[in-house]
Image (cartoon, rainbow, N blue to C red):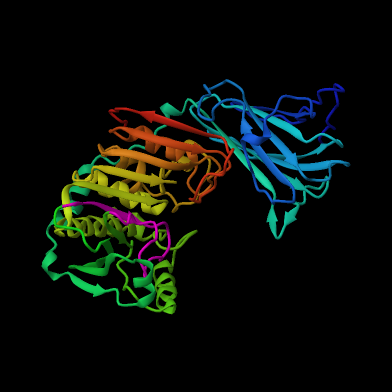
Amino acid sequence: MTKPFSLTSTTRRILRAPFVFRAPIGIIAALFAALCVFAPETSRGATSPTGPSVTGRTDQPPLSYEPGAPAVFEFSVRGFAPDRETFVKWTIIGDGGFKRSSGVAALPPGVSDFALTNTIHAPGFAMASASLATGPDGKLFRVDGQIVSCTLAAGFGTEAIRAMPEPEDFDEFWKGVRTEAESVDLSGVEILPASDTTVAAKWPGSTVFGFRVPIPGHAPATGWIAFPRDAEAGTLPAELRFRDYGVGGGSEPSPALDRSALAADVNAHGFDLGRDPAYYRDFMNRISDGGHGGGYGFRDDENAAPETCYFRDMALRALVAARYVQSLPQWNGADLAAAGAGQGAFQATALAALDRSVSALRVALPWPCDIGGTEKLGRIEGWHPVYQPALRYFDAANLASRVTATCDMEIVGLADLTAPPSGAAAYFNALRGPKKATWVQNRRHETGPVPEGVQTQTVSVASSTGSR
């Protein structure tokens, strides 16, 4: 039975949480009245132009906390029943085996700002979320079917976060994959002209075509190529872009490709290009069959050994596609970028780790990272295959330790429960070249521009020896 919150002042309202947590995490919940110092304009949560919103920020830069020091998660409710009691359902989760805790706070009329204070005593992250509720039972309030919420995270001693140790034969395994990619005969490439008028209309001034490179014993490397039509030989930087989890990219090139470069949109699976939507639905269903907790890449039988993991051939196709791009006459022979978000970040990282021709790596929301961190280290649970030792070969954080190219982690979501921030920190720490990461509050597993006012922190390291 929880005790009621108590009001302690007419100018500053403080509500103390009536709960006890196991060490190493202790939490105090506080509610501040409107006279408290708070800057809601610096962050936006789930908002509507005319409806309610929850926004928030941490009292210091998100990754600035030392283990054991308190982090204050400051939230603000706007546009929601200011003349009567407002109910907020809060949730706290954290690394280090912390057990999820939650409750419902009642904000008196006129009180719209509140805070949760939390600390952990080892390197890791803690997350705090606040969602509008319809009453003391915690039933979530919705606008057009969507909850109105904000999720924040604080990092404690993040420079010390590491992924699970890599296998002893990690380099030997990947040497075999690289050797296989180098043995593929590029003379067998098939070119698919982009004759579809819709594709042509979207790429004025560009040469666009599909490619298919057969790989003996495996699905081929397939994707789209686009470059300026008037480009002369040896003049263009090259970019290979990889997509997030799924089967997108079959019908046309990604609009995110750099139109001034020799750009490739490489799909993960080697499927046919230019087919009807039913083909890609059936393809996804087929490769996802038997996935444990997910689709492709989640089959326990495949993940029992690295040679049969789905992600192995995904990396193989990335290497073969890169060889093909480098064989095209438009490439300048020097500048080669690999880019991707989510699963695409894994492919881009594998390419940068295994092909030293890659000069720049651009990723967002890297996945999968820190595989086994939940099971073995008690970290916040993300979405990934059930842990088996063979999956450590495909942990993007372990591959990152072989990357010497300049890396820009364009977006890291501090509210990402698909690829939790602890995995991204392990990835960042492992990189061996110049690196930069932009951490974004209330950002889940999604790319796109950061709204004005959202709290961010950019961490840059000019040179690094990485970590293993």
Q: Is residue 245 magenta?
A: yes
Q: Which one is nearer the viewer's eye here, 135 or 308? A: 135
Residue at 56%, 21% in the rendered image: 68
Residue 18 in sight in this render = yes
Q: Which one is nearer the viewer's eye here, 292 or 316? A: 316
Query: 456 left or right of 53?
Result: left
Query: 72 left or right of 270?
Result: right
Q: Which one is nearer the viewer's eye here, 26 or 38? A: 38
Most frequent secondary structure within the magenta stretch:
loop
Residue at 43%, 67% in the rendered image: 288
> x%, y% of residue 112?
78, 36
> x%, y% of residue 238?
24, 52
The magenta segment is 235-260
Residue 251 in sight in this render = no
> x%, y% of residue 395?
36, 45
Residue at 77%, 51% in the rendered image: 139
Q: Please state, as top left, top right, bottom left or bottom right, where the C terminus lies in the image.
A: top left
Q: Is residue 267 magenta?
A: no
Q: Please state, as top left, top right, bottom left or bottom right, where the N terminus lies in the image.
A: top right
Q: Quadrant location of residue 101? A: top right
Residue 178, placed above or below residue 228? above
Query: 274 left or right of 132?
Result: left
> x%, y% of residue 447?
48, 50
